[in-house]
Image (cartoon, helix red, strand yellow):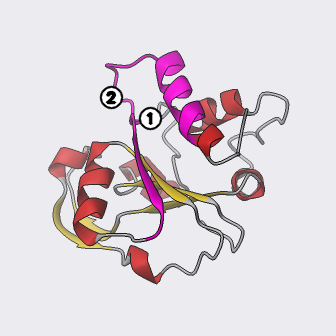
């Protein structure tokens, strides 16, 4: 999910089982991405979860994009540690003229993308919004994400 005006691309590793079934990014209700993003723009209500098209517009309207490091993989369950036989997306082929940075949602996305290389953009590694990453509180994750988004002029 990207647009020509995307300034910051949020990269995950690969969608969860629930996200694949629903054909929606971050569809697992336990994933904190949508809650975290709403906290960054509290005055601009996020559409409800049943309005996925509205959520996509909401993301794109803020200069954000969502995509994954892997195009295909084999995995039992939803943990990044279970990913096998992964085929990476070619991130260098994205046509995003306003792209300033890539924000990796977790360590697995960051590690793979660093092997592939993206030149000309700032790369950030953010704490994962996955329910499996409970070491950080939602408030602490939100502040880390806010700092990166503010560097790109996307939020205060």
> Residue 78: x percent and y percent?
29, 46
> Residue 133: x percent and y percent?
33, 28
Specify the quadrant of the image occupied by residue 41. top right
> Residue 80: x percent and y percent?
24, 47
Label 2, secondary structure: give it: loop
Q: Which residue appears at 61% of the width and 30% of the height?
A: 35
User: Dot 2: few (<14), some (14–19), or many (≥20) neighbours within 10 Å?
Assistant: few
Q: In this view, does 147 lie to the left or right of 134?
A: right
Rendered-image quadrant of the N terminus: bottom right
Q: Which residue appears at 31% of the width and 19% of the height?
A: 135
Range covered by the magenta-colored residues: 120-148
Q: Name the residue under label 2.
A: 133
Q: In this view, does 92 lie to the left or right of 46?
A: left
Kindly indicate whether the residue at mark 1 contacts the one at mark 2 (C-beta within 8 angstroms): yes
The one of 57 and 51 positioned closer to us in this rendering: 57
Per the image, is 145 magenta?
A: yes
Q: Which residue appears at 84% of the width and 36% of the height?
A: 44
Specify the quadrant of the image occupied by residue 113. bottom left
Quick check: 130 above or below 116? above
Q: In this view, does 88 lie to the left or right of 45?
A: left
Rendered-image quadrant of the C terminus: top right
Q: Which residue appears at 25% of the width and 43% of the height?
A: 79
Quick check: 125 above or below 71? above
Per the image, is 24 magenta?
A: no
Label 1, secondary structure: give it: loop
> Residue 9: x percent and y percent?
54, 58
Q: Mark 1 points at which residue?
A: 129
Between the residue at mark 2 and the residue at mark 1, the CA separation in whole angstroms equals 7 Å
Q: Residue 57 carries which label?
A: none
């Amino acid at each position: 999910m990207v647009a020509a005006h995307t300034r910051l691309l949020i990269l995950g590793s690969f969608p969860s089982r629930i996200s694949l079934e629903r054909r929606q990014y971050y569809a697992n209700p336990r994933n904190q991405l949508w809650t975290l993003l709403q906290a960054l723009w509290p005055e601009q209500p996020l559409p409800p979860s049943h309005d996925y098209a509205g959520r996509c517009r909401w993301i794109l309207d803020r200069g954000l994009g969502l995509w994954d490091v892997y195009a295909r993989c084999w995995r039992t369950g939803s943990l990044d540690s279970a990913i096998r036989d992964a085929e990476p997306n070619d991130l260098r082929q994205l046509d995003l003229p306003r792209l300033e940075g890539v924000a990796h949602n977790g360590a697995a996305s960051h590690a793979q993308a660093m092997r592939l290389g993206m030149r000309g953009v700032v790369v950030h590694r953010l704490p994962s919004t996955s329910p499996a990453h409970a070491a950080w509180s939602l408030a602490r994750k939100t502040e880390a994400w806010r700092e990166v988004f503010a560097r790109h002029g996307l939020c205060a």
